[in-house]
Image: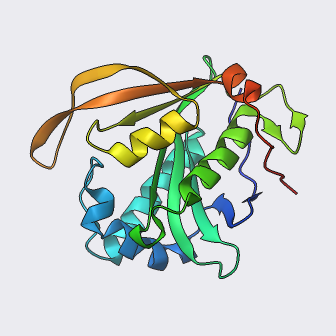
Amino acid sequence: MPLIPITPLHTPRLTVRGVTAADLSQLLPINADDRVTHHLPYASWQSMADAEAWLARIEGLQAAGGTQQWVLTLCETEAVIGAAVIFKHDEASARAELGYLMSPACWGQGLMREAVTALLDHAFGFNAGIERTDGLRRMEAEVNPLNAPSNALLQGLGFTLEGTLRQRWTAKGRTYDTHLWGLLRDEWLDRAQTPINVP
């Protein structure tokens, strides 16, 4: 089955929605920050041209059906504070991979956990107490073992550390391992959590 279509997701402090070209000016300083991209396999953005090239690539991937790019905005100000992506969708196996990033100004406040919870509810087909049959069966994430906050986030959300992929990535002049995390739909739905409401 295809991914469940993007629709705005609302949490107590955030709106998680599809990316638009108007978001690039706010995404640029986040992706230009070396603290944000340190554990990611791409170089920090240097200019709006980098942002525009990224969006063009994302739009192509979304048109092909295997990727969904989201942005995280604060409810009070509508400021873009981060982004998340569901990608590498394998339709036959009903699985996909999750990635995310956030402005350092918002680190340590539980905002990424809030956003990813909403995204997992959406991707697995469980929103506002209504369970769909067309959600993903499995979500995966690859994380640099040195990225302690990201590993802790996934563990806290119920992901299982399924192994370490040795010398998985070569980027920015270095080769490094990644942790492979996995979460099954049934595991997520079994968790005693209040679903995030979606209008």
Query: Which quadrant of the figure has residue 9?
Result: bottom right
Depth check: give the residue in front, 164 or 108: 108
Between residue 119 and residue 94, name the one nearer to us. 119
Left/right of residue 150 with respect to residue 121 in the rendered view? left
Q: Residue furthest left?
A: 173
For the point 45% across and 27% down, which residue is it? Answer: 181
Report the side of 136 relative to 67 (left or right): right
Q: Residue 156 at x, y = what percent? A: 54, 38
Coloration of the structure image: rainbow
Please give the name of the residue rendered at 39% of the width and 48% of the height, measured from the top-left corner.
149
In the image, is residue 122 above or below residue 132? below
Residue 4 position (above or below residue 35):
above
Q: Quadrant of the N terminus?
A: top right
Q: In x, y percent, where is residue 145?
A: 28, 35
Residue 59, visible in the rendered structure: no
Residue positioned 62% across, 54% down in the render? 115
